């Protein structure tokens, strides 16, 4: 099993944080949401989602609580913390700068 | 803020592990169920749906492991496992553990003990309020450590703009008479604002205030220290208001300072505080010191005796303070003496300690720390060596662990855990050892006067932290190389239990040999230093002082504390000498201003009648003052009748002082042989006239020449001395010299009784034999030599263990090779000499490196040595021989074992 590259890892973290910024969610719902919004472009394996969640929790960006889910089973819901929200803002800005820069490079016309 | 979330999580991961694991299970299970449902809803059969969900997860156990990694539980868990494993390994090799812990304990213990000394002298802070804002105010510049006259202090106190408060104190020694006994007490005479400036409150009663410091002579109140209260007054509860006699005058105790407070100078404990206005009683000037018998020190500008301490206003830099104070001091001084040179005044932070003390202690501390540091390094090298041989023995175990997938990083961490555990055990034992050493020191304190400061050192929190830090660093230092080495075996031979691959053996040995060479070099350094110190001490003790030191008792007679007039003093000296001389067992007794070889001296300007004169006109007295090497000045002493006889200083020419040298008779002096040789090389000195007062006399005729003797210290060059008769030169305050027929020590009680029967108010606590006073002056050298010798011996022992260990290891690894050699016809003695040669090559390399370093670094020791060159040939020749001999013995044991091996057994040994 090859580890996702740092870049991809960072991207996954950003996506999770963004999804959680909308509303608290449990793992499975996050995975569904990822697939929906990215229109299947971003194939995040279910497996790599949980280590990422645990890591974000350890970092203090998100925090978890157990409560009943929509099908009335106990599920672990994650939500953004204050520092996590600030982290997300910073990382989103970074990402936008980076993608704008890459887009600009790609649009260069070959002579 | 983030840590508010993080810390409880981490702790939970470790301490509520099963709970966390259950949650992880449940979380993943929930995901799988939902996913299975989702796939079923898309039309998959239930079993297929479940399988698809599991596939999408990609291995549940692996994911769990990744989640655990994400939670970082492994780091802590592994550490605990490592620790358990390490403890088990150490228990399994009790011999190894004992040797390693013992070496480390000796190394860390020695370092901790010496550090507690450094802590006590250089790092301690005065127990006073906000010391960061306190400065010492030094008259004459930062290094002078010098002092103010009272008028100069008072002017600056009133005029300065930089201090919130400027206090002063002068050292006093007072005769304390209370409850029928008289003692000498060391204390301070302080300005009224002293306690306010340094921010110290009374533990009982009150401290002195500016109201106690208004009218000269009108404030007979005193504050005593906690030590005096408990030591002298038994801690009695009615101490406040208690009346005592100080220097014969009645004083009332108004308060007690808190425990631990000993004045404004670290390392000097003062137990008595009296107001400045009581100067005339508490610090009577000595005759001959100011030139006036009854100088009023509160008015005299030339007599500088007061230390300054001040609390600075916030926001003023040191440079600003110095500039402003210097300008004011210069201006005041020029009002009295127009056109006088500038008067620099400089402040130094109280937290830096008294400037002089620091300068004295730093080189000593540096020397001691490097010596014990070297011992610790040797101990480290030894333990590293032991770890390497254990590592070699554990190659198989380690290779197996590596082969079944343990990472090298894990292995290194585990080995470092082992060495850290060892180091911490060694550190704990070392602290116990240091504690024992400090206790032993407290049990046998140095003789009074042996050290410049009172050392009160204890194992406090800072010392403990030092020991802990040292243990951790030590553990890494000796553990890292073996851990790196051991964790990288050549796998396949190690698994086959065959470490006898030549290349492999070579790499093992190189590191171990390098360690042994370093050990030998370091111990050579220590042994040479020890040798030099011992030589120096031997020279110093063997020096002939020039008088019969072995039969002398000396007792200071501080009659100035009794405020005697000159006729009273003169009569008292005569009666004291007569009374003591009448004691059975006393041959003779006399008095002298300076008790030679106790550190105090007196120098005077010198003029010889008929020769061209300088305008020099001075006389100064104090610790360490000698006119050595000057032609325009001379060391001097004022002596009573019979002094030369009592001291055992033989007369060479002319006559001794006698009845004819009365107060009104022509002035007479006696000089030493070197004085005559220096100033009257080819003339007869008898009858020549000299002046020790000024260029215009009064002239004193030389009536006799006596043998040279040492003046300030045993280690000094012979310096010319002029003796003046007490009859013609007033001195308030002399030392009684008593010459015994037999052992002088037995006479101490009788002499004390005789003196106290003459004058009950005279404190004479310090009657000592000249021999013990000399021993006190050699105390530091003796301690230094003892310490270095102990460290050197320890280093030698450790290094020979190291040599033995590496040779035994080398031979054990070469049993087959040696077997082949012997099978092919090598004699036992060939094998024997092969091993010896190999071992001694290492020792030789170590000695060569050590000698090189010693020759290069010896100059650093020169300042501590007396009568021995820092490159003393006998020391440099003997020490390597001794070291080589001991190392040879360490090689012989394994060499004999090797040469006795049976070739057949050796060949089959695998």
Image (cartoon, grey):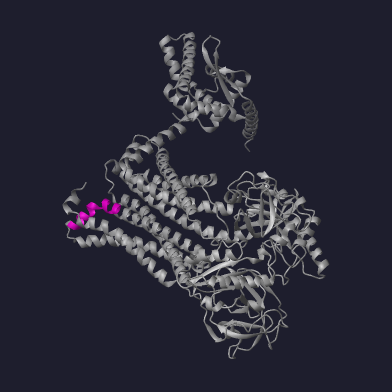
| B576 with respect to B17 (left or right) | right
Does residue B813 belong to the magenta stretch? yes
A35 w.r.t. B686: above or below: above
The residue closer to the viewer here, B716 or B404, is B716
The residue closer to the viewer here, B422 or A15, is B422
Does residue B104 belong to the magenta stretch? no
| B724 with respect to B798 (left or right) | right
A34 w.r.t. B879: above or below: above
The residue closer to the viewer here, B879 or A78, is B879
Query: Is residue B860 in view?
Result: no
The residue closer to the viewer here, B800 or B255, is B255
Q: Which of the 4 image quadrants contains residue B662?
A: bottom right
Residue A55 percent location from the top left of the image: 53, 28
Query: Is residue B356 in view?
Result: yes
Q: Which of the 4 image quadrants contains residue B82?
A: top left
Residue B791 percent location from the top left of the image: 43, 58
Q: Count the marks.
A: 0
Residue B540 percent location from the top left of the image: 48, 70
Which quarter of the rendered picture does the N terminus of chain B lie within? top right
Residues rendered magenta in the picture: B808-822
| B850 with respect to B398 (left or right) | right
Chief secondary structure of the magenta portion: helix
Residue B464 percent location from the top left of the image: 51, 45
| B769 with respect to B228 (left or right) | left
């Amino acid at each position: 099993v090859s580890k996702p590259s740092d870049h991809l890892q960072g991207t996954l973290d950003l996506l999770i944080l963004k999804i959680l910024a909308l509303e608290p969610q449990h793992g499975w719902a996050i995975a569904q949401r990822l697939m929906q919004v990215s229109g299947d472009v971003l194939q995040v394996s279910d497996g790599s989602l949980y280590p990422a969640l645990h890591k974000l929790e350890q970092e203090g960006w998100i925090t978890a609580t157990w409560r009943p889910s929509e099908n009335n089973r106990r599920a672990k819901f994650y939500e953004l913390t204050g520092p996590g929200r600030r982290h997300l803002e910073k990382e989103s800005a970074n990402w936008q700068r980076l993608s704008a820069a890459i887009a600009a490079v790609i649009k260069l016309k070959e002579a | 803020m983030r840590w508010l979330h993080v810390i409880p999580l981490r702790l939970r991961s470790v301490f509520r592990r099963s709970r966390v694991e259950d949650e992880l299970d449940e979380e993943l299970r929930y995901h799988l169920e939902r996913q299975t449902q989702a796939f079923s809803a898309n039309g998959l059969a239930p079993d297929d749906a479940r399988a698809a969900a599991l596939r999408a997860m990609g291995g549940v156990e692996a994911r769990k492991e990744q989640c655990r990694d994400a939670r970082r539980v492994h780091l802590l868990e592994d550490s605990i496992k490592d620790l358990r494993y390490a403890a088990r390994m150490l228990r399994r090799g009790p011999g190894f553990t004992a040797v390693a812990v013992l070496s480390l304990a000796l190394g860390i213990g020695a370092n901790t003990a010496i550090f507690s000394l450094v802590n006590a002298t250089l790092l301690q802070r005065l127990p006073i309020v906000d010391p960061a804002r306190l400065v010492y105010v030094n008259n004459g510049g930062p290094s002078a450590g010098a002092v103010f006259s009272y008028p100069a202090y008072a002017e600056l106190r009133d005029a300065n703009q930089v201090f919130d408060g400027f206090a002063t104190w002068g050292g006093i020694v007072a005769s304390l008479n209370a409850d029928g006994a008289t003692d000498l007490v060391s204390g301070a005479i302080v300005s009224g604002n002293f306690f306010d400036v340094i921010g110290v409150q009374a533990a009982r009663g009150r401290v002195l205030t500016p109201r106690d410091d208004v009218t000269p002579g009108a404030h007979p109140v005193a504050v005593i220290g906690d030590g005096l209260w408990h030591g002298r007054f038994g801690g009695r509860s009615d101490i406040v208001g208690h009346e005592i006699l100080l220097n014969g005058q009645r004083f009332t105790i108004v308060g007690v300072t808190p425990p631990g407070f000993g004045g404004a100078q670290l390392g000097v404990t003062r137990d008595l505080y009296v107001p400045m206005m009581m100067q005339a009683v508490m610090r009577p000037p000595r005759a001959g010191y100011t030139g006036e018998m009854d100088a009023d020190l509160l008015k005299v500008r030339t007599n500088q005796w007061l230390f300054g301490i001040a609390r600075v206003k916030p926001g003023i830099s040191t440079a600003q303070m110095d500039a402003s104070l210097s300008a004011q001091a210069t201006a005041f001084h020029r009002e009295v003496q127009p056109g006088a040179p500038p008067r620099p005044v400089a402040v130094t932070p109280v937290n830096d300690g008294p400037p002089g003390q620091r300068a004295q202690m730093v080189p000593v501390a540096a020397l001691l720390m490097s010596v014990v540091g070297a011992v610790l390094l040797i101990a480290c090298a030894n333990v590293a060596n032991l770890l390497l041989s254990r590592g070699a023995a554990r190659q198989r175990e380690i290779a197996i662990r590596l082969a079944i997938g343990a990472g090298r990083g894990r292995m290194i961490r585990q080995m470092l855990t082992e060495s850290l555990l060892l180091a911490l055990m060694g550190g704990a034992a070392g602290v116990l050892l240091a504690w024992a050493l400090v206790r032993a020191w407290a049990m046998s304190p140095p003789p009074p006067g042996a050290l410049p400061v009172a050392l009160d050192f204890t194992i406090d929190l800072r010392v403990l932290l030092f020991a802990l830090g040292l243990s951790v660093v030590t553990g890494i230092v000796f553990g890292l190389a073996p851990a790196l080495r051991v964790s990288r075996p050549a796998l396949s031979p190690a698994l086959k239990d065959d470490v006898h691959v030549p290349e492999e053996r070579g790499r093992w040995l190189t590191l171990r040999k390098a360690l042994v060479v370093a050990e030998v070099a370091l111990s050579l350094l220590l042994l040479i230093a020890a040798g030099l110190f011992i030589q120096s001490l031997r020279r110093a003790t063997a020096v002939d002082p020039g008088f019969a030191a072995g039969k002398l008792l000396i007792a200071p007679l501080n009659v100035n504390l009794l405020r005697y007039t000159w006729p009273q003093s003169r009569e008292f000296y005569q009666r004291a000498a007569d009374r003591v001389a009448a004691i059975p067992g006393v041959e003779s007794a006399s008095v002298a201003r300076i008790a030679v070889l106790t550190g105090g001296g007196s120098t005077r300007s010198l003029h010889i009648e008929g020769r061209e004169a300088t305008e020099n006109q001075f006389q100064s007295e104090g610790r360490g003052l000698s006119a050595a090497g000057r032609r325009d000045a001379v060391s001097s002493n004022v002596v009573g009748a019979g002094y030369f006889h009592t001291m055992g200083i033989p007369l060479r020419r002319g006559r001794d002082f006698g009845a004819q040298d009365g107060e009104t008779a022509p002035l007479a002096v006696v000089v030493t042989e070197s004085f005559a040789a220096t100033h009257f090389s080819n003339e007869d000195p008898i009858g020549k006239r000299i002046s020790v007062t000024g260029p215009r006399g009064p002239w004193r005729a030389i009536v006799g020449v006596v043998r040279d003797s040492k003046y300030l210290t045993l280690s000094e060059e012979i310096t010319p001395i002029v003796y003046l008769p007490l009859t013609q030169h007033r001195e308030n305050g002399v030392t009684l010299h008593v010459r015994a027929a037999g052992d002088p020590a037995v006479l101490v009680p009788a002499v004390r009784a005789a003196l106290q029967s003459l004058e009950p108010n005279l404190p004479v606590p310090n009657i000592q034999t000249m021999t013990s006073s000399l021993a006190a002056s050699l105390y530091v050298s003796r301690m230094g030599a003892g310490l270095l010798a102990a460290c050197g011996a320890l280093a030698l022992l450790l290094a020979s263990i190291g040599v033995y260990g590496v040779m035994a290891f080398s031979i054990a690894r070469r049993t087959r090779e040696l077997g082949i050699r012997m099978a092919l016809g090598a004699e036992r003695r060939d094998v024997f000499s092969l091993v010896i040669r190999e071992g001694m090559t290492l020792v030789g390399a170590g000695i060569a490196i050590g000698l090189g370093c010693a020759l290069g670094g010896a100059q650093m020791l020169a300042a501590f040595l007396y009568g021995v060159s820092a490159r003393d040939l006998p020391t440099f020749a003997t020490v390597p021989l001794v070291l080589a001999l001991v190392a040879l013995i360490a090689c012989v044991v394994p060499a004999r074992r090797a040469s006795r091996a049976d070739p057949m057994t050796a060949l089959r040994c695998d």
